[in-house]
Each structure stands twice: as C-alpha cells, then as structure tokens.
Image: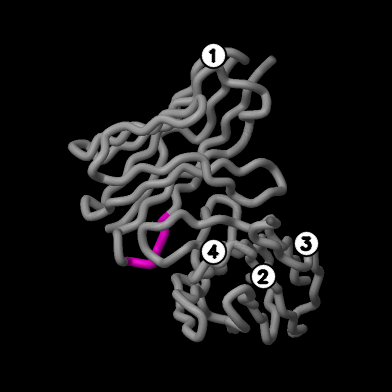
Amino acid sequence: GESVGLHLPTLSVQEGDNSIINCAYSNSASDYFIWYKQESGKGPQFIIDIRSNMDKRQGQRVTVLLNKTVKHLSLQIAATQPGDSAVYFCAENRGSNYKLTFGKGTLLTVNP
Amino acid sequence: NAGVTQTPKFQVLKTGQSMTLQCAQDMNHNSMYWYRQDPGMGLRLIYYSASEGTTDKGEVPNGYNVSRLNKREFSLRLESAAPSQTSVYFCASSSWVGTDTQYFGPGTRLTVL
C-alpha cells in the first residue's frame, strides 16, 4: 500500500555538523517529493522539493537526494544550526492525485 | 503578503457544540486544503478544494463540512464536536492540485471536552 516512512524518529547532532534525515516511500508511482520543517507550535514550512526526473537538488544549506531504485529520499542539512531544531516531514504526491501523503516526521535536535 | 492565515489560534468546545475554522490565502492559489495533525498520526487530509466552486473529501471527512467561500477563503465546520476531533487543524493552499507545493497556515489548536 501507500506509505511514507522514516528510518529514524529522532536525530541529535552537534551545532556545525551535517545532518541527514531519511525517508522511505513505497509507491513507485510517486513523482513529486517535498520536505517540510515544522517548529513547535507552528505550521509545516516548505524547505525543498524534487521531482522524480531528478536525483539531486540543492538549496541554501540543504540538499535532497532521491534514489528511485530503492525508493529512498534524504534531506541533508549542512552546518546545522540551533535554529534547525524542528520536526522534518517528507511527503509524496502521485502527479494528478490531489493527495499529499506525509511521513510521521523526524525530530532533529541541535546541541550547541 | 501574509501567505495562509487561520483563525482562531486556539479553541475549546464542549461535546455537541459547533464551530467554524476560517482560512484565507493571499497568494492567488487555486487549490486549498484542510488537514488535521494528531500525535503519531502525521498530517491527514480532511477536505480539499481543487478550485473555486469545488470541494472533495479527503482521508478523514466524517464529522466535518467545508465551504469554499471565494478564491481566497476556505472554511471548515464542525457541526457537532466530539472529543475525537481534538486536534491541531492546518489549512494549506497551492497553485493547483497535484504536483504543486502546498503552503501551510499556522494552525488552530482545538480541544473538545
């Protein structure tokens, strides 16, 4: 069935280190993926997206990698800062389908 | 440019009471959505509106109704609140349904006693 899940529910890193948050998906028809950041008491905030015709996409301090062979998505955050502490969600969308399926989230904690 | 706004931020209801959650977006988006977020459950779609004048059910529509008032506004109504509807509700919008990024509002935290 459809599912978007995460390998690690929590991740703790030191300030300045690089962070990698992983996400597995099971629907091979998914063609659009998004990473969201959610700080405590706030709504999800768009970070970066990637379409299935790409393997990698870079933003400011963030990189998303897509491995369609093993249905795996990852978010890399360079030089992690305390302000990066939040829950990170991956989500997938099957093209014309309205439905954005969310993973349950990974809590990233950055230690000063 | 405020993005997606929601009112109220917090609400406490008694079982059986009704209320309407308001959502507005100023990004000229065609599609709007209502989600609920529960611990350990992730975000689940309640209803969505692909374009002005249309609404459709999502994963968990029971106990809710929606109105797409105009292109900017999309409201969610609880006719007879139940404790199972205690949750955080998020409104989102996107240019179109499908492969377009959804932008979220700050949420409404609802408690039903």
The chief SS type of the magenta part is loop
Q: Does mark 3 fall on the same chain as mark 1?
A: no
Q: For marks 1 and 2, give the one nearer the viewer.
A: 2
**Pointer 2: what residue?**
B23
Q: Is residue B109 magenta?
A: no
How far separated are the C-alphas under marks 3 and 4? 18 Å
How far separated are the C-alphas under marks 1 and 4? 34 Å
Numbered mark located on residue A70 in the image = none
| Circle 3: element type | loop
User: Disc 3: which chain?
Assistant: B
Q: Is residue B64 visible?
A: no
- x, y (%) of residue B77? 66, 81
**Pointer 4: what residue?**
B93
Mark 4 belongs to which amino acid?
Ser
Q: Quadrant of residue A58?
A: top left
- x, y (%) of residue A97? 33, 66
- Near mark 2 (Cα within 10 A), the count class, few <14, some 14-19 or many ≥20, is many
Relative to residue A43, is residue B55 depicted above or below? below
Q: For marks 1 and 4, give the one nearer the viewer.
A: 4
Mark 2 belongs to which amino acid?
Cys
Mark 3 belongs to which amino acid?
Lys
- Near mark 1 (Cα within 10 A), the count class, few <14, some 14-19 or many ≥20, is some
